[in-house]
Amino acid sequence: MAKAHDSKSLSQARYTRFADGYVTSETHAHGSDLDRLIAIAQPQPQWQALDIATGGGHTALKFAPHVAHVIASDLTPRMLEKARRHIVGDKGVANVSFREADAEDLPFERDRFDLLTCRIAPHHFPDAQRFLRECARVLKPGGVLMLQDQFLPDDEEAAHFVDAFERLRDPSHNRAYNEAEWIAMCAAASFEVEHREPYIKRHQFLPWARRQGADDAAIARLIQMMRAAPPAAREWMDPADWGSDSATFVNRHIIVRGRAG
């Protein structure tokens, strides 16, 4: 329990510090992955929705026109305030409210929501299985879970490398999972996985690193780490123009639609 508490405290501290960058991040605010989430979820106008670990609020904002109401929740109060200013203050959206919440201990009653979304966040959670059990608890029977997160290759050495690379840039990264692990955890939480697909994001390396406050020394370590990566990890991450100002790499995600039992 102490380890989980320390991990959550670290996440709060880091996302308090870097909240502005996640509201303005092009990677988080835009992209066809948001459109895919809408297309796969098929939200209905009467639905009550919850967005977990909302960050800059981009997923809540995307779903708001398609449902009756969205609660945007996050562990970090400053991140929630930045999201509220963006969604309500800047965009004038009226059907989004905001609630501080731990993804592994949601402050909502059983069977409340028709839709639950969580985008690019579970790799921070100390206990992803507990998070999924909480999702199942607060969703109505037959409710929809839309999950998107980084995922790992099946190759153990490559998976270890990808996690370590992410953690060097952001120490609050707990761990990602491979596809089979996600499917097994969903099943253990009584979700029927109705759809899954990969989604590839190519990141500009320097903005990606700077968004989490990486200094020149940390960036140099990341560059060197990639140069020494195992072949399977290099194939998975596909670095290009590595070491230059235009360096990029691939970050692979999985999108899952689950149906609550």
Image (cartoon, rainbow, N blue to C red):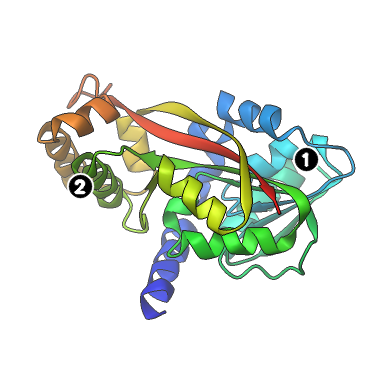
Residue 203: horizontal and vertical position, in percent?
37, 29
Q: Is residue 118 left or right of residue 212?
A: right
Quadrant that contains the C terminus: bottom right
Frontmost of labels 1 and 2 is 1
Count of marks overlaid on the render: 2
Residue in the image at 20% along x and 47% along y = 218
Labels 1 and 2: the sequence-earlier one: 1
Q: Is residue 115 above or below residue 36?
A: below
Q: Is residue 32 above or below residue 17?
A: above
Residue in the image at 81% along x and 35% along y = 66
Give me the disc on residue 64: 1
Query: Residue 220's image quarter?
Result: top left
Give me the disc on residue 218: 2
Considering every residue shown, the one lying at the far right of the view is 46
Say which element carries label 2: helix
Residue 134: horizontal and vertical position, in percent?
62, 64
Q: Is residue 22 left or right of residue 3?
A: right
Quadrant that contains the N terminus: bottom left
Q: Amino acid at mark 1?
A: Ala
Residue in the image at 80% along x and 42% along y = 93
Q: Between 161 and 31, which is closer to the camera in this rendering? A: 161
Say which element carries label 1: helix
